[in-house]
Image (tube, helix red, strand yellow):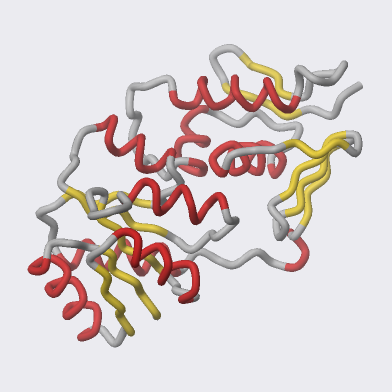
Amino acid sequence: MKILVIEDDTDTANYTAEGLRQEGHAVDLESNGKAGLVRAIGGQYDVLIVDRRLPEIDGLTIVKSLRGAADKTPVLFLTTMAGIDDRVEGLEAGGDDYLVKPFAFSELLARVHALARRPPLAEETAALKVGDLEMDLIKHKVTRAGTEIELLPREFRLLECLMRNAGRVVTRTMLLEQVWDFHFDPKTNVVETQVSRLRSKLDRPFDRPMIQTRRGAGYILAKPR
């Protein structure tokens, strides 16, 4: 794999890079957020390992910029910021996983391999359609009744999950796992907040709502009647 490590702590950066190289991976290093973003955009990497706190441009801004440019390269945040709110913030920004320092290299390696195993978009799933709602997974574009709907990366992933399960109840736990990669309950209203934001863009401008709440169960995306 080709991996970019954006880390300003020299010891951590060298330790991480050397371990990954010993496993047979090609590793590039950047210690500056601005330089890291430039290299990430043009490097065609398989995985990015990004520190939260970096000179010039912080890790959150790097990932938000990449996701805003429809770059879906998997990102592992590597940071000392261990709070639940910090984890939520990192994943909300578009990160795919979050590892707190100090860490065991074996765990970092397992997480990197897990991110790299995520399958690319298959040709048959390049587009999703439910009623008058359409999603182009390649162009990262959503339209309803011919009107384009601008979504943030996390909103896009949330809608994708609902569309792939159209007509079926999607539980809060399923959304946490599939959209946020949480395998624990962060005890926040992050799901409810994002669903509300998605509704404001997907349903409220139109006569017929599609996102329905099943109290005590979850959410369902139904074809408008």
In the image: residue 68, left or right of residue 168:
left
- At x 32%, y 83%, the residue is 25
Q: Is residue 157 left or right of residue 6?
A: right
Q: Quadrant for the C terminus, please.
A: top right
Residue 71, position in %: x, y?
A: 55, 60
Residue at the image point whose x is 35% and y is 74% from the top: 3
Vertical comparison of 203 with 2: above or below: above
The answer to whether 150 is drawn above or below residue 139 in the figure is: above
> Left or right: where does residue 158 sit relative to residue 54?
right
Give the residue at the far front of this rendering.
Answer: 56
The x and y percentages for residue 118 are: 50, 64
Quadrant housing the N terminus: bottom left
Q: Residue at x 45, y 72 (%)?
A: 46
Q: Nearer the viewer, residue 128 or 143?
A: 143
Write down the quadrant of residue 211 in the picture: top right
Residue 149 placement (x, y as % from top left): 75, 36
Residue 223 vs residue 88, the one in the foreground: 88
Residue 26 image point, x, y percent: 33, 84
**Quadrant in the rendering for residue 112:** bottom left
Numbered disc total: 0
Q: Is residue 191 above or below residue 153?
A: above
Residue 7 versus residue 68 in the image, above or below: below
Residue at point 70%, 32% (across, down)? 168
